Image: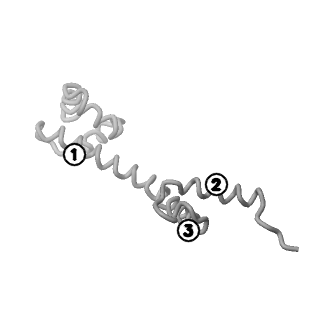
Amino acid sequence: MRVKGGYKTRQRRNKIKKQASGAWGTKHTSYKIAHQTVIEASGYAYRDRRNKKRDFRKLWISRINAGLKPLGLTYSKFINQLNKKNIKINRKMLSELVINNPEEFKKLVTETIK
């Protein structure tokens, strides 16, 4: 006896098609191609969740370096001084200081240089 695709099968397929709803053309209507699209997209999402962390760290470092240039210091020397003084502050907070509180950042830099 042949089992036809019933309620559960349609539910499962519609779930995949809904996930692929933003895709162009047959990629969101045909189940087989939609399934491939969803698998590929989830791989990109997994990869880029990690790349996002990498990109933000690069952004913070470039902001810190830009804030240090007028003070006559480079990023690597500043981080080295922070580590020697045992000052624990992450790059995200340092970049926020550069943007929002440049005078406080300048105080921090002068403290680390001493």
**Residue at x 56% of width, y 63% of height:** 34
Q: Name the amino acid type tagged 1.
A: Tyr
Question: Is residue 30 found left or right of 111 in the rendered image?
Answer: right
**Residue at x 51% of width, y 65% of height:** 26
Q: Name the amino acid type tagged 3.
A: Ile
Q: Secondary structure at mark 3?
A: helix
Task: Kindly indicate the quadrant of the structure image that contains residue 101.
Answer: top left
**Res. 33 mark:** 3
Mark before the other along the chain sequence, 2 or 1: 2
Q: Quadrant of the N terminus?
A: bottom right
Q: Nearer the viewer, mark 2 or mark 1?
A: 2
Residue that protrudes farthest toward the right in the picture: 1
Within 10 Å of disc 3 (Cα), the crowding (few <14, some 14-19, many 20+) is: some
The residue lying toward the viewer, choosing from 86 and 4, is: 4
Q: Which residue is mark 2?
A: 15
Q: Secondary structure at mark 2?
A: helix
The residue lying toward the viewer, choosing from 76 and 65, is: 65
Within 10 Å of disc 1 (Cα), the crowding (few <14, some 14-19, many 20+) is: some
**Res. 75 mark:** 1
Question: Is residue 74 found left or right of 8 in the rendered image?
Answer: left
In the rendered image, residue 88, in percent from the top left (x then y), is placed at 36, 36
Mark before the other along the chain sequence, 2 or 3: 2
Compared with residue 13, is residue 93 higher up or lower down, i.e. above or below? above
In the rendered image, residue 4, in percent from the top left (x then y), is placed at 79, 67
Q: Quadrant of the C terminus?
A: top left
In the rendered image, residue 17, in percent from the top left (x then y), is placed at 59, 57
**Residue at x 45% of width, y 52% of height:** 49
